Amino acid sequence: MLPIEALMDEHRIIERMIPPFKRELARMQMAQDVNAKFIETAVDFIRTFADHCHHGKEEGILFRELRKKTLSPQHAAAMNQLMEDHAHSRRTTNNLAIANASFANGNAESWRDVWQSLKDLVELFPQHIEKEDSNFFYPVMEYFASHELDAMLAEFWEFDKKLIRVKYETVVGELEKTSANE
C-alpha cells in the first residue's frame, strides 16, 4: 500500500460528511436557525479527523518528506496551495465554531455566519480532495524510493495510534480548566 492510499481512504470518509452538511445547510436556510449540536459535531469531526488526523499526516509526514526532495516548480506550487487550503479550512472551521457559540448564546442572527462558514467548507473540501487525488498524490510518489514509502506508511500508522490519546488528553485538560474556574 502506498501512503497516499491511506490518505485517499480518509478522503472518502470526509466526502461522506458532505451530504449531511448540505442537508443541514438547506434546513438552516429554511428555518433561519442552527442545530448547535450538529454544528458542534461537525466542528469536532473537521478539527479531529479532517485536520488533526488527515492534514496532520499530509503536512507532518508527506509534505515534510517532500520538502527534503527537489520538487518540480509545479509540484512545489501545488503543495503550497494545498497547505493554504488546509489553513483556510482551519480558519473557516474556527469561524464556524465562533458563530455557533454566538448563536447558542442568544445571537439569533449568527445563524447566517454559521451557514456561510459551513457552506464555505462544503465547497472547499471536494475541490481540495480532487486536487490531491487527481493531480498531486500519484505524481509526487515518484520522488520516493520504495523503502521511503514503506517508512512513511509506517509513520502514518504510528501517528494514528497516538491520535486518540492526544484528543482525549486535550479533552481532560479542557475539563480540568473548566472545573478549576468554578
Image (tube, helix red, strand yellow):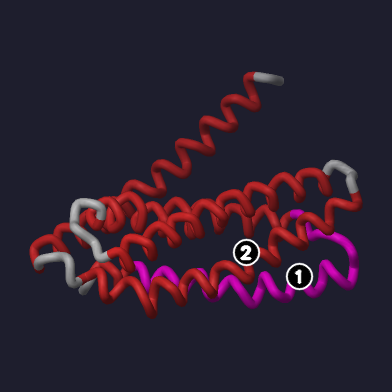
Residue at image coords 76%, 70% = 25
74 or 10: nearer the viewer: 74
64 or 109: nearer the viewer: 64
Position of residue 22 relative to residue 151, above or below, is below
Looking at the rendered structure, the kind of residue marked 2 is Leu
Tell me the CA gap for discs 2 and 1.
Answer: 11 Å
Position of residue 68 relative to residue 125, above or below, is above
Task: Tell us which disc is closer to us: 2 or 1.
Answer: 2
Q: Earlier in the sequence, mark 2 or mark 1?
A: 1
Q: Residue furthest front?
A: 73
Badge 2 element = helix
Badge 1 element = helix
In the figure, residue 151 lies in which quadrant?
Answer: bottom left
Residue where numbered disc 2 is placed: 121
Question: What x and y, as percent, mark residue 103?
Answer: 83, 48
Question: What x and y, as percent, mark residue 38?
Answer: 71, 60
In the figure, residue 121 lies in which quadrant?
Answer: bottom right
Residue at image coords 70%, 67% = 119
Residue at image coords 44%, 73% = 131
Position of residue 61 relative to residue 7, above or below, is above
In the displayed structure, does residue 68 sit left or right of residue 75?
left
Q: Where does the magenta region start and end?
A: 7-36
Specify few, some or many for label 1: CA neighbours under 10 Å numbering under 14, 14-19, or 20 or more. many
Q: Main secondary structure of the magenta part?
A: helix
Question: What x and y, as percent, mark residue 31?
Answer: 90, 68
Residue where numbered disc 1 is placed: 25
Say whether residue 8 is magenta: yes
